[in-house]
Image: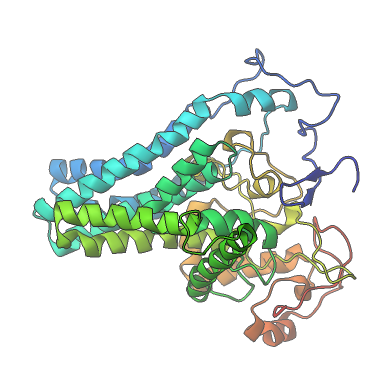
């Protein structure tokens, strides 16, 4: 490994972003507030709290206008307003100077912005349960509110993602609390110890394959992520000599937290809220999975001569620098740097020139992913171009592999941009 490379927590090797590697010895680390640099997005991060406030905003808008369709404010904002903002505001590829990264990560203001999401999230959930039980909503209005709550719980999984990678115990516990609303506590285990190890390989249930629609990916990743988490946790407990049903099982703890939450809400507000609680949970984790779908679509780490996968590179994640989506998702779109440094806080994540880029922000691409012909038209040629015309180097849906190779050919066989060098492609069924 070259001395200029950066090694991830999972052992993946990344080249540093040009002029922005704070680990360089010749760059002094700034622990005091910098005098010459200011984070232009410092207060913009507070806009992310609009999402958990959306149930209250929806209620206020309905009260003011009488337009009951505004109970659907959550999906209208995420799938309508956010893509427009991505287009209007544009992109930001600037990285913070190396000398301020340590200070930037130490500034607790940024943590408090993330922490604030969770109490507002649960205030909105309780408010929604009250509306479902006593607000006199029609079934359609209740569904609209459930989908709005689902957008809150879906982006709460991203909040849990930010917190779950941190070393502080309180933040990891907060991550589990954020996941309880969607009954998706296994994400805490599978994402950290599964996805980050197997990313951009056929073995990863959270990496989508070339030719795979979101609707084919969804059941594979939902089931595969759950079974992966169970297997990972079972192996950990076996090493400790503990039963799977031990209270030391992080899965059991997560499930118990979700059950307790749902039981408490039904006990207080009645059975009428249960269908809507289920609907918002499905909406929430589906929002997570559509983001998973677009983050690594078709990208494949090649197998080396010893049959082991090459180390993860910036070229194995789709990135975006659209400001609007980045602000609402805590820089999740700077995904290559996240895989390079999983514990790095969102405000310090960097843009990599070597990373492939989506044509727009996640908000826009979610909408595109929900329309498979539009997704294929938008993304398939980008995957092919990324591998210089050699589609055999992509992560292809196994049942379509022969058809895809017949259609697009194998190109020149050269490696795609940002790959670590020659290597033989892993078969999609590996």
Q: Position of residue 125 (x, y in %)?
A: 27, 48
Q: Measuring 69% from the left and 65% from the top, which residue is drawn there? A: 299
Q: Residue at x 64, y 70 (%)?
A: 380
Q: Quadrant of residue 142?
A: bottom left
Expressed as whole percent of the image width and height from the top left, the position of residue 140 reads 18, 63
- Position of the C terminus, as image quadrant, is bottom right
Residue 160 position within the rendered picture, expressed as x and y whole percent measured from the top left: 48, 46
Left or right of 380 on screen, residue 272: left
Q: Position of residue 86 (x, y in %)?
A: 50, 46
Closest to the observer: 231 or 266?
231
Can residue 342 be seen here? The reply is yes
Left or right? Give the position of 391 relative to 298: right
Examine the rendered structure and indicate whether residue 226 appears above or below residue 63.
Answer: below
In the image, farthest residue toward the top: 35
Q: How is the image coloured?
A: rainbow
Q: Is residue 80 visible?
A: no
Q: Residue at x 46, y 29 (%)?
A: 112
Q: Is residue 330 above or below residue 411?
A: above
**Frontmost residue, 396 versus 133:** 133
Residue that sits furthest to the front in the current view: 241
Please say if 417 is above or below 4. Answer: below
Q: Quadrant of residue 201?
A: bottom right
Task: Tally the numbered discs.
Answer: 0
């Amino acid at each position: 490994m070259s001395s200029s490379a950066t090694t991830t927590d999972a052992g993946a090797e990344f080249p540093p972003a040009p002029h922005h590697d704070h680990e360089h010895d010749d760059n002094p680390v700034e622990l005091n507030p910098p005098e010459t640099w200011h984070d232009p997005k410092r207060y913009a991060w507070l806009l992310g709290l609009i999402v958990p406030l959306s149930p209250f905003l929806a209620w206020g808008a309905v009260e003011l206008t009488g337009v009951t369709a505004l109970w659907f404010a959550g999906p209208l904002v995420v799938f309508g307003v956010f893509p427009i903002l991505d287009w209007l505001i544009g992109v930001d590829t600037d990285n913070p100077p190396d000398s301020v990264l340590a200070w930037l990560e130490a500034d607790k203001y940024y943590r408090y912005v993330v922490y604030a999401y969770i109490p507002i999230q649960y205030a909105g959930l309780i408010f929604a349960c009250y509306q479902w039980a006593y607000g006199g909503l029609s079934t359609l209005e209740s569904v609209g509110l459930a989908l709005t709550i689902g957008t809150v719980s879906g982006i709460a999984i991203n909040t849990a993602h930010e917190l779950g990678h941190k070393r502080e115990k309180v933040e990891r516990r907060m991550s589990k609390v954020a996941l309880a609303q969607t009954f998706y506590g296994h994400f805490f285990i599978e994402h950290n110890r599964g996805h980050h190890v197997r990313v951009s390989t056929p073995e990863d249930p959270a990496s989508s394959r070339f030719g795979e629609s979101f609707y084919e990916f969804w059941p594979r990743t939902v089931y595969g992520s759950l079974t992966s988490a169970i297997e990972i946790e079972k192996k950990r407990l076996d090493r400790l000599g503990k039963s799977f049903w031990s209270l030391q099982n992080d899965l059991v703890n997560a499930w118990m937290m979700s059950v307790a939450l749902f039981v408490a809400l039904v006990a207080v507000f009645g059975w009428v809220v249960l269908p809507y609680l289920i609907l918002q949970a499905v909406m929430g984790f589906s929002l997570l999975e559509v983001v998973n779908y677009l983050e690594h679509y078709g990208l494949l780490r090649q197998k080396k001569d010893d049959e082991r996968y090459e180390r993860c590179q910036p070229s194995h994640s789709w990135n975006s620098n659209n400001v609007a989506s980045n602000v609402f998702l805590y820089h999740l779109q700077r995904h290559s740097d996240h895989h390079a440094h999983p514990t790095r806080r969102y405000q310090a994540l960097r843009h990599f020139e070597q990373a492939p880029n989506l044509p727009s922000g996640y908000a826009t691409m979610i909408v595109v992913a929900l329309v498979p012909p539009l997704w294929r038209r938008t993304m398939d040629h980008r995957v092919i171009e990324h591998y210089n015309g050699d589609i055999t180097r992509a992560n292809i849906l196994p049942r379509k592999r022969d058809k895809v190779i017949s259609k697009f050919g194998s190109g020149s066989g050269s490696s795609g941009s940002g790959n670590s060098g020659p290597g033989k492609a892993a078969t999609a069924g590996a």
